[in-house]
Amino acid sequence: VMTRNMEAAKVLECIETAKRRRGIKKPLVIHSDQGVQYTSEEYKNKTEGMERSYSRKGNPWDNACIESFHSLIKREWINFYHFETMKEAKKAVFEYIEGFYNTIRIHSHCGYESPMEYEKNYKILKKMRLEKN
C-alpha cells in the first residue's frame, strides 16, 4: 500500500493483507522504526497480541534490510521513471516487487535463487524431511 501520508491505518492494512496472503493468523514479530505511525495508540491497540519490535533511536543498522531494499528499488527501477500520478507510481512499484524482485531477481541470501523459487524449494525440502522421518 502506497499512500501520501503515514497513517497507522495503512500500515495495519498492509499487515492484514500479508497475513491473509500467507495464511498467517498473526505475525510473530513486526519490526519497524519509531515513526509516529508505529508508536501511535491506534497501532498499539490494533497490534495487541503481536510482538512489536522497534529500531533503536538513531541506529540505521536496525533497519538495514529494508533500507537496502529501498536503495535497490530506486537504483534498479524507480530512477528510470517520471511519474505524473500516484497511480503510475503504485503500478511501477507493484510491477517491480511482484513481477521482478520476488519472482525473477536472484538474491545472494537465497542461494542465488529468486525469493519465490527459494521458498518453493524450501517447502519441497521440508516436506521431504518430514516424509523421511
Image (cartoon, rainbow, N blue to C red):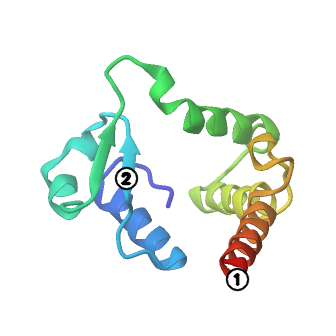
Q: Secondary structure at mark 1?
A: helix
Q: Quadrant of residue 85?
A: bottom right
The spot of residue 129 in percent (x, y) is 71, 72
Q: How many numbered discs sit on the rendered protein? A: 2
The spot of residue 17 in percent (x, y) is 46, 72
Residue 3 vs 98, above or below: the answer is: above
Lower sequence index among marks 1 and 2: 2
- Residue drawn at (75%, 69%), measured in percent from left and top? 125
- Which residue position is annotated with label 2? 29
Q: Residue furthest bottom?
A: 131
Amino acid type at image mark 2:
Val
Q: Residue furthest top?
A: 58
Give the label on residue 25, or none: none
Q: Residues within 10 Å of mark 2 (few under 14, many from 20)?
A: few
Q: Secondary structure at mark 2?
A: strand
Q: Residues within 10 Å of mark 1 (few under 14, many from 20)?
A: few
Q: Quadrant of residue 104?
A: bottom right
Choose mark 1 or mark 2, whichever is in front.
1
Give the label on residue 131, or none: 1
The spot of residue 105 in percent (x, y) is 84, 52
Amino acid type at image mark 1:
Glu
- Residue drawn at (66%, 51%), measured in percent from left and top? 84
